[in-house]
C-alpha cells in the first residue's frame, strides 16, 4: 500500500467550524486510523474530521500543543511518540500510568489528559475471537512499549500464570518488577523468562502466546525453531500484535496447527475505545467487528 497524505504543519483555518481529531506518528502515511475513525463517525452520526500528522522527531510536543491550542478535539499517538506523550500530559488515567505510555489524548479544563487504550483493545479483540484469559497460561514476548501497554489489562483478566520473555531478559525482569504490585494485589503469578528457557522439552503448554516484540518488522520470529516446537502445541492460540501480514511468528504457529491472529482487531478496538471516550458514546454503536471485516477485505 502506498503512503497516504499527511500533514507536517498546521494551519488555524483548518480548525474553523470543524471537530478535528488526528493521529500523530512518524512515519504515519500507512496508518489506517483515519479510515477506522471515519467509519465510526458514519455509524454513530458524528460530524468530524480525522487527520494524519507527521511531526519531525523533535517537533512532536510542539505540534501536539499547537493542535490543541488551535481547537483540536482529540489525538491518537503512535510510534515513536507514545512515551513522550506520557511525559507531556498533565493528567494520566490509571491505565496510562500502568502502561507508562499514552496513545489517546484529549483536553479537560485546559489540561492534556493521556490515556492508553491498547490493552483494553487487545482484550476485547481476544474476547471477540472467543479467547478468554481467566485461569489461562499466557506467554508475552517482548519487553518494549507494546508489552508494557498490554500487561496490566491482561493481568486484570486473572490468568493463572503470565510469563514475559524477551531477547534481553533483563528488560523482561524489569517489567515483572514494574507490574509486581498489581499482580500481587490480584494474585496473578508473573515471571520473566529468557527465550532459551522456552527451548526445553516438556514445557507446560501455553493457552495463549502473544508476540509484542518488534521482530516481525524485520521479517523474523523471536522464537528459534526449537522454541517454536515447544511453545506451539495444537491448542495454543498465537496472537501477533503486528497486522497486515502473516508474520514469521504466525507462520511457525500455523505450521503446528495453532489458531493464529494478527493485531488488526486490536487496532480497531483500541481506536473504538478512544472514539467513545472523545465523543461520550456507547461502544456498541460502533459495530467494530463489521468495520474489522471491511478492513480485511481491502
Ligand atoms: P515497542 O515500543 O514497539 O514495543 P521497542 O520498545 O523498541 O518497541 O521494543 C521492541 C521489542 O522487540 C523489544 O523487546 C526487543 O527486544 P530487546 O529488548 O532485546 O531489544 C524486541 N525485538 C526486536 N527485534 C527482535 C528480534 N529480532 N527478535 C526478538 N526480539 C526482538
Image (cartoon, grey):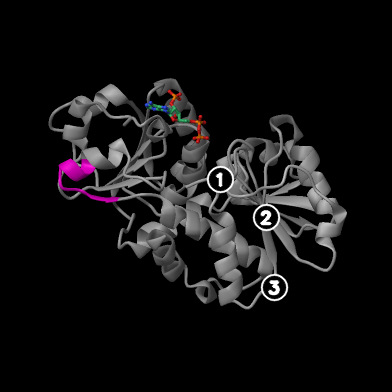
Residue 181 in magenta? no
Residue 51: which disc?
2
Looking at the image, residue 182 sits to the left or right of residue 230; the answer is right
Give 266 or 199, whichever is nearer the viewer: 266
Mark 2 vs 3: CB contact within 8 A: no
Give 274 or 37, whichever is nearer the viewer: 37
SS at mark 2 in the image: strand
Of mark 1 and mark 2, the one earlier in the sequence is: 1
Q: Position of residue 218 (x, y in %)?
A: 40, 29
Q: Which residue is mark 1?
A: 3
Of mark 3 and mark 1, the one earlier in the sequence is: 1
Marks 2 and 3 sit apart, C-alpha to C-alpha, by 14 Å
Q: Residue at x 13, y 32 (%)?
A: 202
SS at mark 1 in the image: loop
Give 178 or 285, whichever is nearer the viewer: 285
Image quadrant in which the C terminus is located: bottom left
Q: Which residues are magenta?
A: 253-260
Q: Residue at x 61, y 64 (%)?
A: 275
Marks 1 and 2 sit apart, C-alpha to C-alpha, by 14 Å
Image-quarter location of ligand 1 = top left
Residue 47: which disc?
3
Marks 3 and 1 sit apart, C-alpha to C-alpha, by 25 Å
SS at mark 3 in the image: loop
Say above or below: 37 vs 59: below
Q: Nearer the viewer, mark 3 or mark 1?
A: 1
- Ligand 1 is within 8 Å of the C-beta of the residue at disc 2: no
Amino acid at each position: 500500500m502506498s503512503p497516504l497524505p499527511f500533514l507536517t504543519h498546521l494551519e488555524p483555518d483548518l480548525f474553523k467550524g470543524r471537530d478535528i481529531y488526528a493521529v500523530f506518528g512518524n512515519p504515519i502515511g500507512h496508518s489506517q486510523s483515519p479510515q477506522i475513525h471515519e467509519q465510526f463517525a458514519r455509524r454513530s452520526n458524528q460530524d468530524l474530521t480525522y487527520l494524519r500528522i507527521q511531526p519531525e522527531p523533535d517537533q512532536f510536543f510542539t505540534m501536539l500543543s499547537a493542535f490543541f491550542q488551535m481547537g483540536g478535539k482529540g489525538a491518537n499517538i503512535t510510534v515513536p511518540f507514545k512515551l513522550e506523550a506520557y511525559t507531556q500530559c498533565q493528567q494520566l488515567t490509571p491505565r496510562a500510568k500502568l502502561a507508562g505510555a499514552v496513545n489517546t489524548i484529549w483536553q479537560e479544563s485546559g489540561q492534556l489528559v493521556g490515556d492508553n487504550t491498547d490493552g483494553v483493545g487487545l482484550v476485547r479483540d481476544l474476547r471477540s475471537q472467543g479467547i478468554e484469559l481467566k485461569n489461562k497460561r499466557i506467554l508475552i514476548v517482548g519487553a518494549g512499549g507494546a508489552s508494557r501497554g498490554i500487561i496490566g489489562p491482561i493481568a486484570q483478566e486473572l490468568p493463572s500464570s503470565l510469563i514475559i520473555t524477551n531477547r534481553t531478559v533483563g528488560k523482561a525482569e524489569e517489567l515483572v518488577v514494574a507490574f509486581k504490585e498489581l499482580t500481587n494485589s490480584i494474585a496473578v503469578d508473573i515471571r520473566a523468562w529468557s527465550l532459551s528457557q522456552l527451548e526445553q522439552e516438556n514445557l507446560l503448554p501455553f493457552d495463549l502466546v502473544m508476540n509484542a516484540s518488534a521482530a516481525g518488522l524485520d521479517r523474523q520470529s523471536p522464537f528459534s525453531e526449537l522454541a517454536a516446537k515447544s511453545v506451539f502445541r495444537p491448542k495454543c492460540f498465537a496472537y501477533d500484535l503486528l497486522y497486515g501480514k502473516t508474520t514469521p511468528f504466525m507462520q511457525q504457529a500455523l505450521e503446528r496447527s495453532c489458531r493464529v491472529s494478527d493485531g488488526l482487531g486490536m487496532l480497531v478496538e483500541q481506536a473504538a475505545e478512544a472514539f467513545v471516550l472523545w465523543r461520550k458514546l456507547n461502544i456498541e454503536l460502533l459495530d467494530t467487528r463489521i468495520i474489522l471485516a471491511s478492513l480485511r477485505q481491502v
